[in-house]
Amino acid sequence: MLIKLICVGKLKENAYTLLVNEFAKRLGAYTELEIIEVKDEKIPRNASEKEEVIVKTLEGNKILNLLKADDYVILFDLAGKHYSSIEFAMWLEKASVKGNSKLTFIIGGSLGFSGDVINRANERISVSNMTFSHQLMRVIALEQIYRAYKIINNEPYHK
């Protein structure tokens, strides 16, 4: 299975980069992983609602251009479904059994997703009711995917 992680914005802090690289390395034992960064758009100070829509649309178009017709798209989104780590592992296992050879997870920019990206998504998952920076969310996403594989394979890690 190929897992793609599309992220709006770059990693700027070395600590996040080290963690992302560590989880990417660990995931290599279970799946092929591709991380794609999309340049985030500058948000004007005190942006109007119209300006925010423009930013989300520009970022959304960049995301949509990276998607293939057969990508199964999952958004990390506050409005998404909540899973425990065990439920997420069961979901991931089911998704791979259903013949989804490519799962594409997407972490949006600071304003969220455009309507077009939301409409393209097959599923939306929330990891918390709290909001995280896109840098931290990348670490959380990879850690949870790694944890899911450990659970699926009945290997120690998840407690």
Image: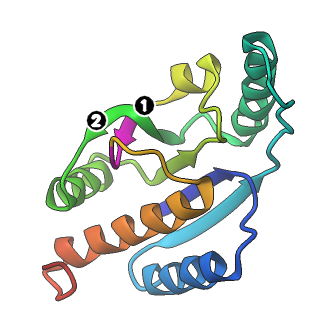
Task: Residue at 33% x, 41% y: name it.
Answer: 129
Q: Quadrant for the C terminus, please.
A: bottom left
Q: Is residue 33 above or below residue 39?
A: below
Q: Is residue 29 above or below residue 56?
A: below
| Residue numbers of the magenta segment | 122-128
Return the residue at label 1. 122
Single out the residue that lies furthest toward the front. Answer: 46
Q: Is residue 156 left or right of residue 47?
A: left
Q: Position of residue 99 (x, y in %)?
A: 34, 48
Q: For the residue carrying disc 1, how many other residues have a C-alpha within 10 Å: few (<14), some (14-19), or many (20+)?
A: few
Return the residue at label 2. 81
Which of the 4 image quarters holds residue 123? top left
| Dot 2: element | strand
| Dot 1: element | loop
Which of the 4 image quarters holds residue 153? bottom left
Q: Position of residue 142 (x, y in %)?
A: 46, 68
**Amino acid tagged 1:** Asn
Q: Is residue 54 left or right of residue 132?
A: right
Q: Nearer the viewer, residue 158 or 3?
A: 158
Q: Is residue 6 above or below residue 136?
A: above
